[in-house]
Image (cartoon, grey):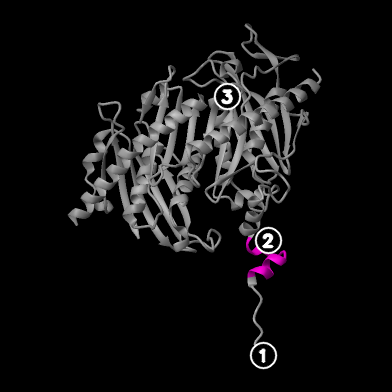
Amino acid sequence: IGFQRKPNIWKVIFETEFIITVEPLEYYRRFLKENCRPDGRELGEFRTTTVNIGSISTADGSALVKLGNTTVICGIKAEFAAPPTDAPDKGYVVPNVDLPPLCSSRFRSGPPGEEAQVASQFIADVIENSQIIQKEDLCISPGKLAWVLYCDLICLDYDGNILDACTFALLAALKNVQLPEVTISEETALAEVNLKKKSFLNIRTHPVATSFAVFDDTLLIVDPTGEEEHLATGTLTVVMDEEGKLCCLHKPGGSGLTGAKLQDCMSRAVTRHKEVKKLMDEVVKSMKPK
Amino acid sequence: FWGAAAVSLQRSAHPLLCYVAHVTVGLAQNFLPEWTLLGDTSVLAGVYGPAEVKVSKEIFNKATLEVILRPKIGLPGVAEKSRERLIRNTCEAVVLGTLHPRTSITVVLQVISDAGSLLACCLNAACMALVDAGVPMRSLFCGVTCALDSDGTLMLDPTAKQEKEARAVLTFALDSVERKLLMSTTKGLYSDAELQQCLAAAQAASQHVFRFYRESLQRRYSKS
């Protein structure tokens, strides 16, 4: 019986689509060698970003942000609360990121998983560090009454880069929030809300997040999709405001980066900030004053 | 394997020296109770593994790393979860998980006292515990905290009071081979140039920490 030599097994694999399921990293590397990605983007290119403000009429402020397929909606409700005893002239901003099973098969229903908790903590840190709102602006009557803004960010479709989308959605929603005027009447000592007189919040800075994924300890790509995040050896998120000041440098482990690589990330974050600011300004202009 | 490490930081009087730490490495029963009365930042770490892992959590080609961080008081909350994620990802980057597929390596951290620079202390404790347990790693890592106050002065390893008054607090995890940045988490506003400055200072300070690791391990293994 003649013994036929088997063809080179790798050639066979390359020829078929099998590689995508068996060796996704190898498939990916072939694209990275040509400095591009399977969806046709360059290494430093973001996906198409769209934002829709004021879509939820029952919320005091809302925004829907789409970063490619990743969709995050932010709804802000303002309620009354007693200010904290250690800071009687401050209000509260309470963010919460929810990653329901709706957005991706990796999440189960039930208490928030680790990813959601980490994202919530990240957004809370961004609000705290960037001083996007002065908490004193939320105070109505020192020691007695203050606003609390409940910011609920819900992911409707998870395709990577959730932190960028959440930060942008939060910023857009906060710009959309209108708080009614509240006076404390002397006779009854109760709050009187004047729904006809509403004012926008004073947004002091515009923090914009830029996320990177590290591949094979060397290559940095911007705005990773869900697949890319899964294959990456590390991630990095930089939150920058308009003066080039950094609010947050979130690098949860992963491969090491040198100072020079960090510098490249910073410059990309600066350009991204300009892009996002332009988009925000267009949206704000198109918002009709109520 | 199992291993345990207690890392406590003592503030040295000289502000430029990053810290002088006492580490007792060994079985939990051998710990002397005196070191807990120092009042400085102390974290106790225990490593268990490679052990059995739940089918839902197992990874076919790597070890599953789990980090549990228990605060000194109160129930663990979202902030602890966030820190656990940071420490876990840092450990995952250095631990050679592919040598123990379908197993779990658990790192348990208990905060004994907190006087500033807590996350850096947790990272150091985790690293020493992993070394003590003999878990195969590609490099060591250390945690360094930097604080920037309002006039831009850099302080390494700040106390709780300094952290509160600082404009920005940056915590880095650096690896021992090339001093690359493994993990970073920051609080407050700072500029790009200040970041590079802090990173350079942290890289210089990490030398002290690695030298200290070496010394304490030498002491431990020369005794037994």
CA distance separating discs 3 and 2 = 40 Å
Instruction: Report the chain holding disc 2.
Output: A
Residue A174 coordinates in the image, percent (x, y) = 67, 25
Tell me the residue that label 2 is attached to.
A20
**Amino acid type at mark 3:** Gly
Q: Is mark 3 on a helix, strand or loop?
A: loop
In this rendering, the answer to whether A280 lies above or below A44 is above
Q: Is mark 2 on a helix, strand or loop?
A: helix
Q: Is the magenta stretch mostly helix, strand or loop?
A: helix
Name the foreground residue: B197 vs A120. B197
Q: Specify whether residue B218 is painted magenta.
A: no
Q: Is mark 1 on a helix, strand or loop?
A: loop
Residue B6 coordinates in the image, percent (x, y) = 30, 45
Name the foreground residue: A80 vs B12. B12
Q: Sequence order check: which comes first, mark 3 or mark 1? A: 1
Extreme-left residue of the structure: B223
Choose mark 2 or mark 1, whichever is in front: 1
Instruction: Report the chain holding disc 3.
Output: A
Q: Can residue B72 be seen in this view?
A: no
Tell me the residue that label 3 is attached to.
A244
Residue density around tag 3, few if under 14, some if 14–19, many if 20 or more, within 10 Å: some
Tell me the residue that label 1 is attached to.
A2
CA distance separating discs 3 and 1 = 71 Å
